[in-house]
Every structure is written in structure tokens, then in C-alpha cells.
Amino acid sequence: MMPKSKFLEVECPECGNKQVVFGSSSTEVKCSKCNFMLVAPKGGKSAVKGKIVKVLT
Ligand SMILES: [Zn+2]
């Protein structure tokens, strides 16, 4: 399951930091603490690498 066009709360698998990212972002999003790439752009969509904690609607 890959939610699109929503804000997601993602937990960094490296350091446990949680941050809100936009699910359909076409830019990469890195963890604000450890720089782990939480969201990687992929063919116009985004691939969320972190653990999705919550989907914010
Ligand atoms: Zn991190």
C-alpha cells in the first residue's frame, strides 16, 4: 500500500525520529536528525523508505 497525495508521519528507521512528509512529493526528504533518506523520488512518485506511522488526511 502506498498512500498518495497525503501527509504522512514517517519514523526514521535509523534514529527513530518522526517527521511529517508529503506523500506525493517529487523531491527527496531526509531525516532532520541523521540525514537518512526518508522519501526518495521515483518516476514522479515518491517511495517512502521510512516506517509510516500515521496518515494525516
Ligand atoms: Zn534519522
Image (cartoon, helix red, strand yellow):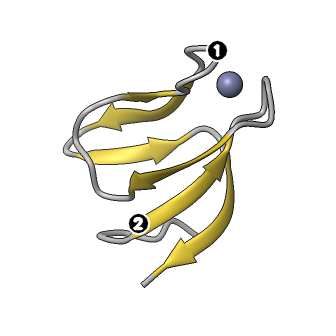
How far across and how far down the image is residue 24, in percent?
Answer: 29, 57
Residue at image coords 55%, 14%: 35
How far across and how far down the image is residue 55, in percent?
Answer: 55, 74
How many numbered circles does the render carry?
Answer: 2
Is 4 situated left or right of 27 in this image? Answer: right
Q: Which residue is mark 1?
A: 34
In the image, residue 37 above or below residue 52: above
Q: Distance between the Cα atoms at labels 2 and 1?
A: 21 Å
How far across and how far down the image is residue 57, in percent?
Answer: 42, 85
Q: Kindly identify which numbered label has been placed on residue 15.
A: none
Res. 42 image quadrant: top left
Residue at image coords 29%, 70%: 5
Amino acid type, residue under disc 2 in the picture: Phe
Query: Helix or strand or loop: what does disc 2 sit on?
Result: strand
The N terminus sits in image quarter? bottom right
Q: Kindly identify which numbered label has been placed on residue 7.
A: 2
Q: Residue furthest bottom?
A: 57
- Badge 2: few (under 14), some or many (20 or more) residues near its Cα, within 10 Å? some
Ligand 1's quadrant: top right
Residue at image coords 36%, 46%: 46
Which residue is more in the foreground, 45 or 10? 10
Query: Helix or strand or loop: what does disc 1 sit on?
Result: loop
Asked if disc 2 and disc 1 are in contact, CB closer than 8 Å, the reply is: no
In the image, residue 41 above or below residue 53: above
Q: Is mark 1 within 8 Å of ligand 1?
A: yes
- Badge 1: few (under 14), some or many (20 or more) residues near its Cα, within 10 Å? few
Residue at image coords 25%, 33%: 27
Amino acid type, residue under disc 1 in the picture: Cys
